[in-house]
Structures are given as C-alpha cells and as structure tokens.
Amino acid sequence: MPNMVVSQLTLKKADLAARYFGADVPSLLNATPSVNSYSDNGTGFGYSYLRIRGMDQSRVNHTVNGIPLNDPESQNVYFNNIADLTSGLEQIQVQRGVGISGNGGSSYAGSIQMLTKLVQQQQQTDLTIGVGSFGSRRFGISYQSGVHKNFGVYARLGQVATDGYRLFSGMQVNNYQFSLAYFIPKGVIALNMFGGFAKSKLAYAGIYADDLNKDRTYNPINQGESDGFNQHFFQLQLSKQMSHKFSYNASTYLVLGKATDFQYFFPKSEYTPMSYFNLPNWFNGIDSVTTSNVMTSYRLNQVFTGTFANLTYTNSRFHVVVGMHLNSFTADHSMVTQNGDSLPPGINGKEHLVYFNTGNKYEISAFSKISYAFSSKLTGFIDMSIRNTGFSYKAKQMEYRPSDHLRSVEPMQWFFVNPRFGLNYQLNQYIKLYSNFGMSQREPTRFDYLADDLANFDVKQSAVKPERVYNIEWGMLINHSQLQMTLNGFYMYFVDQIAATGMLNNFGYPINSNVGLSYRTGLELDLSLNLSPKLTFISSAAFSENKINQIELRYSNATTFADTFVTYKHTTSAFSPSLIVNQGLKYSAVKGLDFEILNRFVSEQFLDNTSNAALQLPSYSVLDFKMQFAPHFNYIKNLHPILSIRVQNLLDEKYCPMGSVMPYTNTLDPSNGKVGSVPLYFPAATRNFFVNLSFSF
C-alpha cells in the first residue's frame, strides 16, 4: 500500500545475500526487532523456530508469493522442509503485530511475506559452496536464462546439511526452485515450483539441568529416531497492468506434503500397553498390561489447493486493493509399528496400523484496503478482512484398539471480521509519523484441541475458544543519508489468548490453553547510523512488558493424584523476554572488504505462565563476527566472487535460547503448595564458524 507505514522491516535481495549463509529463516531474522529464534539441534540449521513479540510462529502469517506456508491444521511452519529457500528469494517483509491484510491467514502476532526471485533480463549463473562447524555445509547452483522471445527461466538446485551441535541431530535437505515466465504486454504469466526433500534426526526434546552441566550436546532422543518429509509447491500466476489505474494478479496453487519416515521409539512401559498400539495380547486377546519396546513410524499425507485474486486501483489520491482467497486442505495421519522385542507372532517387522485419521480444513476469505491522501502530508487507510474457515476430523476404528479410542470430534466452523485503520503524517523531508489500530481473530489449531496426533477424548468446538487481539501501533520513521531509524510503540490486548503451558506433546508441539485477558506492550527500535563514510553503528532492540491478568493451571495432587487447579494473577507470559538488544558495528575497510561485529542480548524468560523462578531461562549475551570480501577483477569483468567468514558465539557463551517443561511433572504438594514442574533446556552451539564462497558469472 503506497505511502503507508506499519511496524515492518523489508529485507531486499542485497540484504538477504549479506545475512544469509545457510541457516534457516528464523536465524536470518534473529537480529530484527522483537524476533527471538532457536533450533532443535543448536546450529540454526534444521528444525528452527521463531517468536515475534513472544508469540510463536504458528501465530505468524507466512506466505511465499501469496501461498500460505502455515500448515492449515497446526498453523505451524516447518522451515526445515524448504531449507535454503532464502537462496531463491527476492525479498522478505516482516510485519509485527496485526499489520495490514494480505493473502494467507490473518496476521495475529505478525506476518512474514516472501517473494521468490524474478526472472531477469540478463543471463547469469551463481554457484555457492559453504562449510562450517559441526559438519555444516551448503551447496547451490542457480541459472538465469535472461529473456528470449518473451520467455525467461530461473532454476536452482541446492543442498544444506549439518551433523548438528547436539548428538544424533543431523539433517540434510535437497531443495529445488524453478520459474518459467512468459512476458505479455504489460504483464507476465509465471509458473513457479519449489520444494525440498528433508531427512532429519530428531532433537526436539530438551535436557535436564544436570545433563546440561555434564554434556551440553546430550540428546535424549537417541534410539535411531528420524524423520523424512517432502514438500512441493506449484503455482501458476498471472499479473497484468490493464491501464495506468487498474491492475490485477491471480494465482492458483497446489502444495503436496508427505512424511515418508518419522521413526519414534516407545520404550517398554506400563503406560503403553500393547492395546495402545492396536496389538492383541496373544494369551487372552485382551491386553492391559503386556508391553514391549516398540519402534513406530508416523505417516502424514497432505494435499493443499487454493486460488486467490487481487484487483488494484490507483489515482492521485486513492489506492484501493480488493482480494479473495479460497483453499482446501486434507491430511491423513497414521502410525504403524515397525519392530519390537516382544511383539505378538506375525507382527514383528511388519507395518501394523496403530491408528488412521483424516483432518479436513477449508477457508474462504476476502479483504479490501483503501488508502486516501488527504493532503501532501497526511494519508489514511481503512482495511477490512473477513474469514470463514472450518475443520472436520474422521478416524478409522482399529481391530484391537479399545472402542473408547474412537472419539468423536465435533465439526467446527468459525467466522471472523478483522478491521484495521491508520494515519501517516509526513512531518518534513526526513521524518514520517504513523499510527494504526487493528483487531485480529484466530481459530484454535488441531493440536490445541487434541494435544496429540489423534483424539483420545470427545472434542467439542467450545473446549477451546478462538483468540482475539486489539493492537495499537504508533511510531516515527527517519530516513536521512546519515541516519535511518524506526522507533515503534505498541500495545496488544488479548481476549482468550491461547498460550503455551510450557509442556510439549510427543511430537514437540506445545500444549496450549486459553488464558483469558492478557497484554503485551513495548517499544521497538531499528537504527542504522553512519559514524563516518566507512563506519556504521547498527542496532535493533525491543523493550516490552508481557503480562497475563489471570490464568488457571491444572496440576496433579502429589498425594492423591487428583486434579488440582491453581490460579495465578498478573504473571509474565512464557517465552517473552522483556529486553532483546542487537547492536554492533559495520566497517568498510576498502572497496569490497567489509567487517561486522554484532552483540545480541536476551533477558530472562519463563518456561511457563506461572512466573516461577525455578522455571526460567537465564539471560545471555552472544557476540558474532562476519567478514566479507568481494574483489573486483578488471581483467575478468563477468566474474564476481564473494568470500564470507562468520564466527558465531565468538566468546563461547554457554546459553540456552529455549526450553520447556517436562510432561507429566506438573504436580502439586498439598503440604506446602509447591509445584514439581521440571525444566528442560535446549542448548545452543558453542563457538562455531561458517565459510561461504560464491561466484556469479
């Protein structure tokens, strides 16, 4: 929306090239205001996650060319499946807070909108090779054909891999991207394809404090568990400038996802009798005690289709965008046994079906955005979006699994209206002021309801309420040759916020619940100050208060094991540090030789919503260094090599950017009122390096 400012940051192709070295999008965005990230294996490669203003990425609307990246059921995003996509991006825009409407689901905590590289007019080939600590490596090659007879092609193949900082946590993703563009008068028709083939060891479980002190690389998932996931995106786009006032774009897409191999080991336990695995007891046909070590495999098969279209009108004062989006999603979830040490005859080594269920979700949404220039200095906008979405679940009855495991899940449907409006004022040549208000609503996820991969109890839509946020933003933007700065204030008031309890289920998904009323408020700074022609000071910072007015949590009585409820008031929201500061210096020694040193400080954060000091991650400070050398050879005009060297965690800080609460430890001692929750920690890598060498010709 021209001339309109919201709380956002746009990283263009040159910015991405300078920041990206192979780690996933969360690491790339870690130094932007209010963003905090971590990865399971501690390196930034593989399964990685981010939070914006303390809220996890399932509450952030992610799109690539308008295609939703969020899984419609879980609303989560798995960057690992499309690792190295950044190599093929034209830009990333990060909006914090409700922002403005676009394709994909409604923005709640924020939105991350990515655009793939455009087909260029000139031919170009790029080659990248990178190696680093913990067996981390990267390879990529891309080709731009240039435009010939109105046709152009962009193609890329790549691979990123690591052995992981933690034990048994390696990953490898082979990825691809292809765009075929046909240029028509004042428009383009494009076919875009991208995706990845991911193979990963699993490290989504945290470790005890004692293990952290003995061996930070310890991984409790150490029985050969692994997963494999393939995800493929296909898109057909049409963009057309019909006149100097009207333009439109339309797109249809297909996304295929398949978990080919998710191995999970269940050790022998009285809590997992054979009936849990839909297995017979070969003595009497009724199994309630007999157990076995069992290696299982989870399977997932997804088909996601959709289409959207936007129409834009512009004149001297008005800018209007209207759009629609329709999509449909189907996912089959199942688990089979692979092998075990004492399974019934005829079962061991065969793929015996444990459960099978199907989730279906659809969405119909529309939006309109109108901006109007009241004068050369004052511009306002109104933005309205509506969403109708629904979810249904159907399970297959298993032969040996008790009939009470076939639970009913009520078909669900939600309808949301999300308004936004704001003003921008151009104070002078360099300074712009802005303010906006927005409301956004979000439905619960499949896992908010089930807390598992299948329904183990009857589920009603009313069991978890949709969450709603009212968001006020205000700020100042300075754009001067010596100083570029955005100072932003925000206040977010939540009703029925779905918040993390701190516990994770067997798949590493957070177990959540409604918490009633809560708020987040703070200041965000993004600054670049030229101290001299060669030296630049950079800083991004977020100062915030994140409170829950009242929350009721369930504990198990340590003596009677009966459910016990405790109410906490005015507590700090989990995983919401009050202070995040990134600041450093960039120095250009000579043309083509640049240095950067950046320090990141993150204050304490709680692992659940009780403000319990025993369930808290300590603050940490990490120093990173980067050198980039891009020599220019007069005698080889078309060769453009770039060498970059990164040393991360230069001072070898021992820190944990994330943690959780161990499942099944939420007990309450009635004699003293103390809770028995046990913290778990996700350690980040110690000092490490990565060297990248790329050529363009």
Image: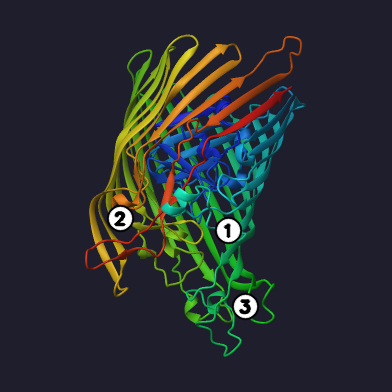
Position of residue 597 relative to residue 517, above or below, is above
| Residue at figure coordinates x 66%, y 46% from the top left | 172
Residue bearing mark 1: 222
| Residue at figure coordinates x 51%, y 53% from the top left | 204
In the picture, the quarter occupied by the C terminus is top right
| Colour mapping | rainbow
Sequence-wise, the earlier of marks 3 and 2 is 3
Q: Callout 2, which amino acid?
A: Val
Report the front residue among 431 and 378. 431
Residue bearing mark 2: 515
Q: Is residue 117 rendered to the left or right of residue 574?
A: right
| Residue at figure coordinates x 28%, y 54% from the top left | 516
Sequence-wise, the earlier of marks 3 and 1 is 1
Residue 297, numbered label: none
Q: Select label 3 or label 2 by which is in front.
A: 3
Quadrant of the image occupied by residue 423: top left
Q: Callout 1, which amino acid?
A: Asn
Secondary structure under tag 1 reads: loop
In the picture, the quarter occupied by the N terminus is top left
**Residue 544 horizontal/vertical position (percent):** 31, 37
Position of residue 330 relative to residue 312, above or below, is below
**Residue 453 horizontal/vertical position (percent):** 51, 64
- Rate crowding at label 2 as few (under 14), some (14 to 19) or many (20 or more) other CA atoms within 10 Å: many
Q: Is residue 512 rendered to the left or right of residue 256?
A: left
Residue bearing mark 3: 342
Q: Select label 1 or label 2 by which is in front.
A: 1
| Residue at figure coordinates x 54%, y 81% from the top left | 290
Report the front residue among 654 and 294. 654
